[in-house]
Amino acid sequence: MPPTPVPSLDFHRVQAASPQDLLAGQVRYSPAKSLWLLGHAAGAVAGALFYFSLSSITVFLLATGAVLLLGHSLGSHRLLIHGSYRCPRWLARVLVYLGVQVGLAGPLSLLRQHELRDYAQRLPDCHPYLRHGTTFWRDAWWQLHCELHLTRPPRLSIEPRLAEDRFYAWLDRTWMWQQLPPAVLLLALGGWGWVCWGVCARICAGVIGHWLIGHFAHNAGGMHHVVEGAAVQGRNIRWTSLLTMGESWHNNHHAFPGSARLGLQAGEWDPGWWMLLALRRAGLVSDLRLPQDLPARAELRALTPQPAPAHPSLGGWRDLPALRGQLLRATAGRTLHLQGPGASMPARWLQALTGQKLHVDKQLARLELHDPTVGIVVRGLPALCVAVARRGAAAHAIARALLPAAAALESARVRLTVA
Ligand SMILES: [Zn+2]
Ligand SMILES: [Zn+2]
């Protein structure tokens, strides 16, 4: 048997006697899993047919958003499974409890499922069930209604700190029943409509959404890193970053599993990370881990240039006078160099906006304008204003009018993304 090809697996919670152990198994129908989803789907359909109202939809959106952000992303995933930040025990319990409300499993079972998948995906060969490697509808059937029974399940050890926690063990035994307290509360406050939408529809959205993201995040989407030797790579799905609270930056997550921040580059929106920054400001969380705090991984290969160390640049609200100066000089036919478009805009839009005369360097990680004559760098949307201003008098006037808003947005972006 060849040695384990991926060095970081030596410290994994899962240890298999042989990589083959993760391949031999059967996908079998799981009545409990299937009926749990179908029952809630029936409740959600009843809600849509008989209780369609603005208040029900609001309850659904608020409950689903809170449970996905605080529970699944912050509680179950970034804290319980990856320990990527620290917080007081009472807060950890609140967040993990909200994670159980997603309706996927109890906290320790979810951790086991996550770790088994993670371990299997890093091996050179992976069972299609564990890597979402089958057709869309078959994967839906497998993941939503079946379970994989491995012939020789590997050893999985959970730290005593978690395994011996009686609250987590209790949640693990009673996770389905944990939907009762919110159901009773919603029934008292708003009747059956609120239960259908606030419990049944929320669980359907959470469970089906979790599978959908899992399917696409291992099959299609952008990549910044390759984990060499792994059977499947994580993919970044840009358009679901807000809906998933940042969890769909899954290629980043495969590269840096212990990072509390998932959207790592400019324009990679990560609501879970924003929430952690807000909680840190309130003094509730600390020690947020970033990729640079994690041990280096020999098997990690970067595909896109990584952001260079920060250098002094103009862009924020306080730089507005200096930015206006840049705008004035920009019309004088000076050679400028634009690097962009950052991650949130296709490169051809940037070229269309700035005109064919300006040389645009394709650069996924940032949007920056360099003025080599005076050595000034303008970053973010103000860089776009300065670049657009070169196109003529009308463009200049528009850019000048938009500059304060661009600087304010850039200030907000820096506050949100710089740890
Ligand atoms: Zn994955
Ligand atoms: Zn993870």
Image (cartoon, helix red, strand yellow):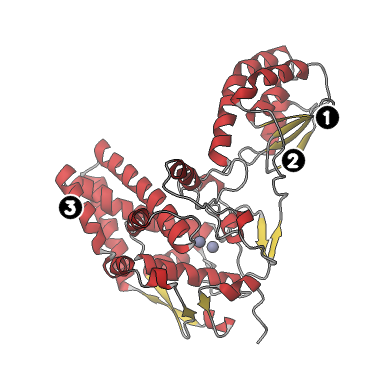
Q: Position of residue 216 (x, y in %)?
A: 53, 57
CB-based contact (under 8 Å), mark 2 and mark 3: no
Mark identifier at residue 362 = 2
Q: Residue at x 57, y 83 (%)?
A: 20
Q: CA distance from mark 1 to mark 2?
A: 18 Å
Q: Is residue 236 above or below residue 407?
A: below
Q: Is residue 192 left or right of residue 370?
A: left
Q: Which circle, 2 or 3, is nearer the viewer?
A: 3
Earlier along the polypeptide chain: callout 1 or callout 2? Answer: 2
Q: Say which of 235 and 100 sits in front.
A: 100
Q: Say which of 87 and 367 sits in front.
A: 87
CB-based contact (under 8 Å), mark 3 and mark 1: no
**Mark 1 residue crowding within 10 angstroms, few (<14) / some (14–19) / many (20+):** few
Quarter of the picture holding the N terminus: bottom right
Q: CA distance from mark 2 to mark 3?
A: 55 Å
Q: Is residue 85 above or below residue 229?
A: above
Amino acid type at image mark 1 = Pro
Q: Is residue 314 above or below residue 307?
A: above
Amino acid type at image mark 2 = Lys
Earlier along the polypeptide chain: callout 3 or callout 1? Answer: 3
Q: Position of residue 337 (x, y in %)?
A: 79, 31
Q: Which residue is mark 1?
A: 372
Q: Which residue is mark 3?
A: 184
Q: Residue at x 48, y 60 (%)?
A: 83
Is the residue marked 1 within 8 Å of ligand 1, measured from its CB?
no
Asked whether residue 27 appears in the rendered view, the answer is: yes
Amino acid type at image mark 3 = Val
